[in-house]
């Protein structure tokens, strides 16, 4: 069965991470960047997770996992070093909860792809668990092609799109303009970007 890729808006959503090791930490960083409200359940936590707790960026329940810990979670991450515990976490979750088991793609309702972010641009690579290492290698290759310059460029594209949409130009011209700015020439020249935005401002 194929997976269905989606981008989730998890701002302020409750995420429960069971286990407090290096892998749990990696997942937490991505979750916090997306604005989630993260609680970790673990009797022992990695130093870096302790720092997140001290900085009030996450909640911590200093205990071993019990099913009640999942009560208000939209997303559950089972990230302990025990296959049995991770399986118990997955089986304790309700059908409405999204579950990621870090050592068992089959028990998971989703898994986490290798991801590259350039401002509003997200590039994600998944292998369905066949080879997370391949996903990472491809991500690092793409990071060189889609370098940091894309951050500002994507912002320019978003602003241009808003302006073009609101302009009085006809539909076909709008489409042409939005295609025209997808080019290295525009990405690499702030001057060209400025001239384009000023031109559109003439058609409001
Ligand atoms: C992409 C990335 C995102 C992230 O974790 O955030 C990610 N793994 C990464 C790296 C990585 N993981 C592993 C290694 C060691 C080398 C190796 O074994 O190949 C490396 C390489 C490294 O660390 O350099 C080991 C490993 N991973 C899983 C298992 C268990 C299993 O497969 O059963 C084992 C064996 C554990 C063991 O038995 O020891 C399982 C999963 N790992 C996934 C994601 C999901 C599938 C993604 C996909 O393939 O589409 C899935 C199914 C669940 C999930 O975690 O969602 C992240 C990219 C790094 C980055 O972004 O920097
Ligand atoms: N998905 C991935 O990318 C990936 C990569 C490497 C490894 N793994 C898997 O992830 C697992 C975790 O790796 P790690 O390096 O973070 O492990 P780790 O040993 O550093 O941490 C394990 C954590 O689980 C906690 N824990 C154990 N039993 C618990 C319980 N009953 N309730 C609550 N917490 C409990 C421990 O307190 C500890 O904080 C590994 O065993 C491996 O199978 C996954």
Image: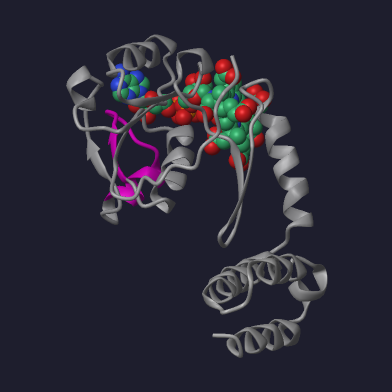
Relative side of 172 to 52, left or right: right
| Quarter location, residue 171 | bottom right
Image position, residue 23 (x, y; %):
48, 33
Q: Is residue 171 above or below residue 54?
A: below
Q: Residue at (51%, 28%) from the top-left corner? A: 111
**Residue 56 versus residue 107: which sits nearer the camera?**
107
Q: Residue at (56%, 78%) from the top-left corner? A: 167
Quadrant location, ligand no. 2: top left
Relative side of 160 to 138, left or right: left
Find out whether residue 154 is within the magenta segment. Answer: no
| Residues drawn in magenta | 37-53
**Residue 14 versus residue 174: which sits nearer the camera?**
174
Image position, residue 87 (x, y; %):
39, 11
Image position, residue 177 (x, y; %):
71, 72
Relative side of 100 to 119, left or right: left
**Residue 85 versus residue 124: which sits nearer the camera?**
124
């Amino acid at each position: 069965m194929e997976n269905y890729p989606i981008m989730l808006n998890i701002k302020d959503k409750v995420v429960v991470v069971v286990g407090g090791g290096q892998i749990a930490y990696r997942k937490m960083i991505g979750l916090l960047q997306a604005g989630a409200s993260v609680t970790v359940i673990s009797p022992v936590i990695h130093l870096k997770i302790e720092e997140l707790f001290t900085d009030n960026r996450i909640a911590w329940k200093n205990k071993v996992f019990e099913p009640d810990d999942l009560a208000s979670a939209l997303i559950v991450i089972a990230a302990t070093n025990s296959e049995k515990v991770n399986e118990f976490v997955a089986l304790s979750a309700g059908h409405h909860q999204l579950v990621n088991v870090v050592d068992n793609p089959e028990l998971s309702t989703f898994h986490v792809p290798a991801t590259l972010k350039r401002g509003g641009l997200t590039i994600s690579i998944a292998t369905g668990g066949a080879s997370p290492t391949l996903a990472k290698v491809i991500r690092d290759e793409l990071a060189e092609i889609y370098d940091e310059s894309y951050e500002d460029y994507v912002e320019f594209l978003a602003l241009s799109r808003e302006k073009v949409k609101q302009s009085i130009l006809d539909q076909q011209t709008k489409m042409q303009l939005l295609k025209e700015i997808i080019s290295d020439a525009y990405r690499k020249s702030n001057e060209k970007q400025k001239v384009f935005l000023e031109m559109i401002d003439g058609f409001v």
